[in-house]
Amino acid sequence: MQDSLYWLTSITADSARVTLVNHDVSSQGQEIAWDSTDSNSLLKAIDTSLSSQNSEATSNCAFIIPPTWVSDDGKIFGEMLSKLKIICQSLKLKPLGFISFDDAFVESYNNNDSFPSSYILVNFSLKHYQISLVYLGVIKKRITLDLDQDFLVSSLQNTLANIEFESSLPPKIIITGTYSSQIVEDIGNFNWLSKNNVETFLHLPDVEAIDMSALDKIYIDTIQKQITPPEVVSKPIENIEQVEADALGFSPDDSPVEVVEIKKTTPVNLPPIKLPQISLPKIHFNYYWLLPLTLLPFLPVLPLFFAKADITIYQNQTQFNETFNVNLDPKTNVSQKTFDLSVGVSTPSTGKKEVGEKAKGEVVIYNKSDRSVSINKGLIITDVSGKKFETTNNILLPASTYNLDTGVINMGQVKATVVAGDIGPESNLPANTSLTVKTDNNLLAKTSVQFAGGTREQVAVITQTDRNNLTETAKQQLKNKAIDDINSQKSTQNSILESTMTFENQKSNFNREVGEVADILTLNLSSKVSFLYFDYQQKQNMVANLFSQKEILVKLDKNSAVTTLNYTAGKLTMAGSANPVININELKSKLAKSKESDLKVILNNVPGYYQYKLSNTLWFLNLLGRLPVNPNSIYIIIKN
């Protein structure tokens, strides 16, 4: 690796951070959150963190990944491998390799101690925390927990107390990742007594917190040792200073050393043993140089015993979409989550209504008859256009009087207050307007003053249709918000079944009643939402079970599969793609000793094959153009 310069890309279940390394940390990028439900989110997060630095410094890249991305056989799962492949291609990065974060930590931490350590590693990310139980330098257990709310040490204690382990838990907790000082203080001050007063540890654990900079140095140390193993250099023997004998505790003795004489013994005569004589051809010294020539016929074959070959096979993935009869039960094979949700929506009212004031004024009522008339309020008086007015008080109308001398009739009259029958300015009659009383021909009337106060305007009112439409809108928004909230909880750790979403205990609260004058109608709708989801282990178990049920899936490699699950009424649909299964050992046996020119013919029988790439370590000595003799010297790499 040129100048030991590379990008250290640390990925957690919900964030990513890129650090430039040149033997040590040169610069650190921002930690950027990413959404596992968005296929481009991780790429954008790494690109953002990378862009905050000199992104042209190098193209080399080493990945620190979550342990849940790696299968038991040490291979990265197909879906995650596809993510990293897209990232490297899009950002033009050259991958040096990957290692899970707890493996990287354990390897470096063990190398720093003379004896393999035992401890509990707790790594915090934005929405999760990973527990790794390390015993004598080996990771024994891994557990991933969600951080729905604030971290509680009691939750960590319950998890540790339920771990099935043959020995007592190591009394040391190492905290890494995105943590706060409060978390470290809470763990350090916690009373580690589990249920029924059973101690979780033999004694209070030591708590050590490792910040991001120190964690990066641990990762760098691990990667550096794997890429460039340290050389073993023999130390030269230093000059030894000559000392006197008495300085070492010996006493010099000048007396002569007694010499013991060894006496001769009488020899014993044994019968002679004769060995068979072997006659070898005599080789003249002048022909020794011909010996190497005897090895020449074997030279073309020798590389086949020592060479190693890497064969990259590119496969077309097989698409599948299969439905199974499966009953999901939160008590056995799936998880369930319930939460409260509410939305507030508004809409303009669509109803129209005329409102206004009725005109009021004073009239004079005349009585033509010779009898007085008592009139209760509510007497209807009309004008020539038919507009009606109503008296507002009781009146006593005097009778008419006659002057026979002059021949003049004086009609009885009285003033009364009236109000228009309808709203509107058209009832604002001018003074001296003639009016009639249709119920009594002896009565006449006219306005004594200008009527006033009559108004009319059109206003918006709430209708039942407005409430019905707003209810449907609120329900849809509640569903959309529930889906958004559910999607925000998706990660590599779980697979949410959106079709199982249900709404219960819905409550509606309108701010206006039907017919009420208002421009805007507002509704607050609340509900209890629940849905089913597979956690990481449940999904792995379900996918493995489904792959074993149908012949088309048995022929596919489930570890390379990228799957989506959907559930409706007892039917579970699994769709996605996966590489066809290859019998690697059988293929290696067929390839061993075969000609490189025949490689394509052999690989044509591999399901899904469309291209290959061969790398032979001793290609320059491979005069016969053949693959290694030993099948174990052939390494098969599968790519899409």
Image (cartoon, rainbow, N blue to C red):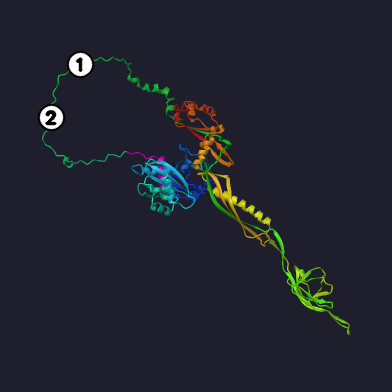
Task: Give the residue furthest to the bottom.
Answer: 405
Q: Nearer the viewer, residue 11 or 615?
A: 11
From the viewer's perspective, is 250 left or right of 122?
Answer: left
Report if residue 24 is visible in the image.
no
- Residue 14 horizontal/vertical position (percent): 50, 47
521 inside magenta stretch:
no
Q: Earlier in the sequence, mark 2 or mark 1?
A: 2
Q: Nearer the viewer, residue 374 or 71?
A: 374
Q: Which SS type dominates the magenta stretch?
A: helix
The stretch in magenta equals: 216-233
Q: Which quadrant of the rendered structure holds the C terminus?
A: top right
Can you say whether 432 is above or below 503 in the image?
Answer: below
Which secondary structure, mark 2? loop
Q: Which quadrant of the rendered structure holds the N terminus?
A: top left
- Residue 155 horizontal/vertical position (percent): 44, 49
Type of residue at label 1? Leu
Type of residue at label 2? Val
Labelled pair 2, 1 in contact (Cβ < 8 Å):
no
218 inside magenta stretch:
yes
From the viewer's perspective, is 125 left or right of 500?
Answer: left
Q: Residue at x 40, y 45 (%)?
A: 120
Can you say whether 376 is above or below 37 in the image?
Answer: below
Instruction: Using a 10 Å C-alpha cutoff, classify the residue at mark 1 as few (fewer than 14 neighbours), some (14 to 19) or many (20 or more).
Output: few
Q: Residue at x 70, y 59 (%)?
A: 351
Q: Nearer the viewer, residue 608 or 353?
A: 353
Q: Which residue carries the number 1 mark? A: 270
Q: Nearer the viewer, residue 578 or 99?
A: 578
- Residue 134 horizontal/vertical position (percent): 39, 43
Which secondary structure, mark 1? loop
Q: Which mark is residue 259?
A: 2
